[in-house]
Amino acid sequence: MDELLDKNKKTWVFAFSKGGIDFLHFLKEYDYQSNINGLSTVATPILGSDRVNHKLLQLLNKIHNFSNNKIYQFFDERFDILLKDFQESLSSDFQENWFKENFSFLPRNMFYTALALESSWYDSHVWMILTKLFFQSESINDGIVDAERALFPDYFQGMNLGILKGHHLIGTRSSDYVQEALIEAHIVFLNYMGFLR
């Protein structure tokens, strides 16, 4: 990380989806607050995602019951079968507890913003249509993350920027969503608020 940061400048981190979670964990563990002035998250399951707790994934995850089996161990050494660690890091059971226990250890002299997404199934990428079909939710969501779980909780001094129309995959370059406009809107707002000076 030292090679990436200019000691004479502050860096603003713009994180999408799990990247926001990873960076929150990074900020808790490492002291880079003198180099980073803020973190903006988009579609980040700050409080986890209930999709990984869904019955369908729980059924698929029963494969982990065979962890003592030599065939399972052979494949597990080479691959993360069904992305077990990834799923656990995103689960609302884990992430919501982690945030409650660790938010006070996050740097205080920087800003935090969060933006959630919502989409209707017919406005979504084909993969998000499938997630909306198989992992249905009563809550407003982007296909993967419920909007309420992508915003900072009241007990944290982050700034929630609201809920924007868009499916969870708008951050991928294969999407036709104009990511540059989203980033530019953040820059204009953060500059107006005085955070990027």
Image (tube, helix red, strand yellow):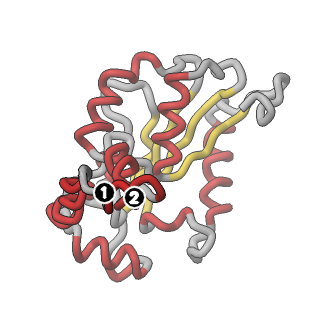
Q: Quadrant of the C terminus?
A: top right
**Is any part of residue 138 visible from this angle?**
no
Please indicate, yes or no, whether residue 40 appears anywhere in the rendered image.
yes
Kind of residue sitting beneath label 2 = Phe
x and y percentages locating residue 7 in the rendered image: 82, 23
Using residue 148 as the reference point, say whether residue 111 is left or right of it.
right
Q: Amino acid at mark 1?
A: Lys
CB contact under 8 Å: marks 2 and 1: yes
Mark 2: which secondary structure? helix
Residue for badge 1: 70
Residue 74: assigned label: 2
Residue 118 at x, y percent in the picture? 36, 63
In the rendered image, residue 145, in percent from the top left (x then y), is placed at 34, 56
Indicate left or right for 88 with 178 as reference.
Answer: left
Q: Residue at x 61, y 45 (%)?
A: 14
Q: Residue at x 18, y 67 (%)?
A: 56
- Whether residue 92 sits left or right of residue 46 in the image: it is left
**What residue is at 35 percent from the left and 61 percent from the top?**
82
User: Taking 196 as reference, is 103 above or below it?
Assistant: above
* Residue displayed at 31% across by 24% down: 155
- Name, please, the residue furthest toward the front: 70
Residue 37's disc number: none
Where residue 183 sits, quadrant-wise, is: bottom right
Percent across and percent down for residue 188 are: 67, 46
Name the foreground residue: 161 vs 148: 148
Using the numbered discs, state the Cα–Cα distance from disc 2 to disc 1 in whole angstroms.
Answer: 6 Å
Of residues 104 and 162, the one nearer the viewer is 104
